[in-house]
Image (cartoon, rainbow, N blue to C red):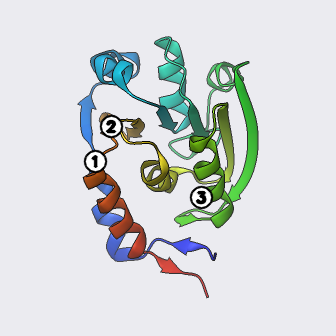
Amino acid sequence: MKLLVLPEDLRSELKNPLGKLYKGNGVECIKAMASELKAAKKIAAVGDMTAFYLLEASITPDLAIVDNKTKRMPAPDHVKRSLEHDSYKTIEVMNPAATLNPELIELIKDSLAGKKRIKIVVDGEEDLATLPVILYAPLGSAVVYGQPNEGSVLIEVTLEKKEQIKDLMGRMVLEK
């Protein structure tokens, strides 16, 4: 499989939340979605601050995808330390900005099919990882990511949501 590249025309579409936006910051957003998270088959967090706030709320995601950055700046040391959680097997992968590397997609697929908690540390950018996470998460799972300067987005994984993501990923460009 080749690298999937985000075309310009999809960028604005992906700026809109893919699920329900919980406005606010940090743990308050996580607490607001707690009942949905408790009912979820699996929980995946995309983004350092999202994973950090879930852990702060005593919710350990089954899959955490981080890049040691927040808003393109290095994540604070206390956040990085918190993400050094004992229960995670850590795997590192390269993924350039505005792309989905096939290796990252396979890691996500394998992680969500397995029983172990996995933390994928991306060298590059992890933002688009939300798409394959939704695609490969079991039905009834929850995917959480941050919406910059607004709050956190919770996506309930349904067949309809998977179809929407297949369509979006199908409109990405295969690198030549």
Q: CA distance from mark 3 to mark 2?
A: 21 Å
Q: Residue at x 52, y 73 (%)?
A: 5
Q: Amino acid at mark 1?
A: Pro
Disc on res. 102: none
The amino acid type, in three-letter code, at marker 3 is Ile
Q: Earlier in the sequence, mark 1 or mark 3?
A: 1
Frontmost residue, 170 versus 55: 170
Q: Is residue 131 above or below residue 13?
A: above
Give residue 38's position: percent from left, percent from top: 37, 18
Secondary structure of the residue carrying numbered label 2: strand
Disc 1 from disc 3: Cα separation: 21 Å
- The relative height of residue 103 versus residue 175 in the rendered view (above or below) is above
Q: x%, y% of residue 71?
A: 50, 43
Residue 153: mark in rendering:
2
Q: Which is closer to the viewer, label 1 or label 3?
A: 3
Where's the C terminus, which quadrant? bottom right
Q: With 5 as the anchor, is 8 left or right in this view?
A: left
**Above or below: residue 35 compared with residue 151:** above
Closer to the camera in the image, 149 or 56: 56
Label 3, on which residue? 105
Pair 3/2: label in front: 3
Q: In terms of sequence position, does the residue under pointer 3 or pointer 2 come before the other?
A: 3
Image quarter of the N terminus: bottom right
Q: Which residue is mark 1?
A: 17
Question: Which image quadrant for residue 146?
Answer: top left
Query: Residue 114 or 64: which is nearer the viewer?
Result: 114
Q: CA distance from mark 2 to mark 1?
A: 6 Å
